[in-house]
Image: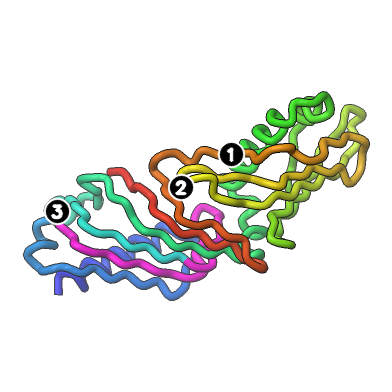
Amino acid sequence: MIGKLLSSAVKLYLRSQVKGVEDLQVKIIGQNKQILQGYIPQVYLSCDRAIYQGLHLSQVQLKGADIAVNLSEVIKQKPLKLLEPVFVELQLRLDAEDLQASLDAALLQSGLSDLWQMILAAQGNANCQELLALKMEWQSLAIANNQLNLVGVYQDSNGSTQSLALSTGINLTNPHTLGLSPLNILNITGDLQCGNLDRSLEIDLGTDITLQAVTIKSEQILCSGKIRINN
């Protein structure tokens, strides 16, 4: 009974945190006494078509265990908090249309901006160093030929708008590191050429993320692993 009531409360809270979500399911498993003491043995969460801070996600599945929360304070209308960090198993699916729909999200734009700086710094040649000082505006993000494909525009030194394409594959170097390879930069217009990056570009995800698999398949990105949620 307590598990069902708490599941309903969590669903209401999650709906308040997202712009949209379909088929949201929350299941909390545990004895009433355990839950009332703030210990949740298992939690399952799944949803489709979630929109969180502008990011579109086709399918999300989460599984957590041995979770300690401040339920005694929640009963007194205090915010729900984790008392200890917890690792949550994650399965995520993004479709091609999710990527394009998410392009204006601040989180994605910030990530793409950081990635762009890393790519150009790794190239190290004069043409790419010139691009490093230019502001890139990404206009499309798609999946094709098992790669991510981006197209952006920038203004050159003469004030003219130029287009640039970036394509890369994604692989796991290790559970905490993403590898981008092969990576190619091509000017659609203009005369700056950076070409292929002659090595895999590695992105450190930190110790809070442990990935088991990242796959680009057809027009989808599939991801599975664990994330650490801190209190």
Residue at 64% of width from left, 45% of height from top?
Answer: 180
Q: Is residue 45 magenta?
A: yes
The kind of residue on which mark 1 rests is: Glu
Q: Position of residue 82 (x, y in %)?
A: 24, 48
Asked if the residue at tag 2 contacts the one at tag 3, i.e. Cβ–Cβ closer than 8 Å, the answer is no
Q: Is residue 39 left or right of residue 109?
A: left
Q: In the image, which is nearer the foreground, mark 3 or mark 1? A: 1
Report which residue position mark 1 lands on.
202
**Image mark for residue 87:** none
Report which residue position mark 3 lands on.
76
* Element carrying mark 2: loop
Image label count = 3
Residue furthest to the left in view is 33
The kind of residue on which mark 2 rests is: Pro
**Image mark for residue 175:** 2
Q: Where is residue 193 in the image (x, y as percent from the top left)?
A: 86, 36
In space, the residues marked 3 and 1 are separated at their CA atoms by: 47 Å
